[in-house]
Image (cartoon, grey):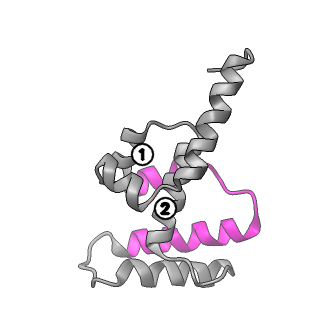
Amino acid sequence: MSLSSWSALPQPKSHWRQRARAAMREVVEAAAHRKRPADWAREQVWRICAAAGVPDDVTPQGLRGTMSTLAHEAGDSPGRVAASLGHTLEVNRRSYTDQDRAEAAQRERALQVIQGGKR
């Protein structure tokens, strides 16, 4: 994620999110010009969790799964979600998206349209 796109994200409302945002900004800036070891992402997630005061059992893989599931629940297209993670549709469905939650959200959106709500 580039620094310009990072600063375009919505401002967090809670204190722990503000702390996480500040910690993440440091990570992005520090990593911009150096090679990273294989476990760099995991270590940075744990460091950000510690700075934000949240449990350190979060993993980069878990964050990708959360992002994928939330994007599907919000109505984003499967192709766009997969592309944002750098995967094919099949890999994204199999490895990242909670299919039960994505399908429930899709049914809820369809019902809203049937009942005269927004598309």
Mark 1: which amino acid?
A: Val
Residue beneath label 1, please? 81
Q: Is residue 68 above or below residue 104?
A: below
Q: Position of residue 39 (x, y in %)?
A: 34, 84
Screen quadrant of the N terminus: bottom left
Q: Secondary structure at mark 1?
A: helix
Q: Which mark is residue 47?
A: none
Q: CA distance from mark 2 to mark 1?
A: 11 Å
| Residue 78 or residue 94, whichever sits in front | 94
Residue at 39% x, 77% y is 41
69 inside magenta stretch: no
Residue 15: within the magenta?
Answer: yes
Camera-side residue: 42 or 24?
42
Q: Residue furthest left?
A: 35
The residue under label 2 is: 65
Q: Main secondary structure of the magenta part?
A: helix
Residue 100 is left or right of residue 38, and the answer is: right
Secondary structure beneath dot 2 equals helix
Kindly indicate whether the residue at mark 1 contacts the one at mark 2 (C-beta within 8 angstroms): no
Q: Position of residue 68 (x, y in %)?
A: 48, 53
Q: Which residues are magenta?
A: 1-30
**Residue at 32% from the left image edge and 69% from the top image edge:** 32
Q: Residue at x 68, y 57 (%)?
A: 12
Q: Looking at the image, is mark 2 or mark 1 earlier in the sequence?
A: 2
Mark 1 is surrounded, within 10 Å at the Cα level, by few (under 14), some (14 to 19) or many (20 or more) other residues, namely: many
73 sits to left or right of 82: right
Q: Position of residue 33 (x, y in %)?
A: 27, 72
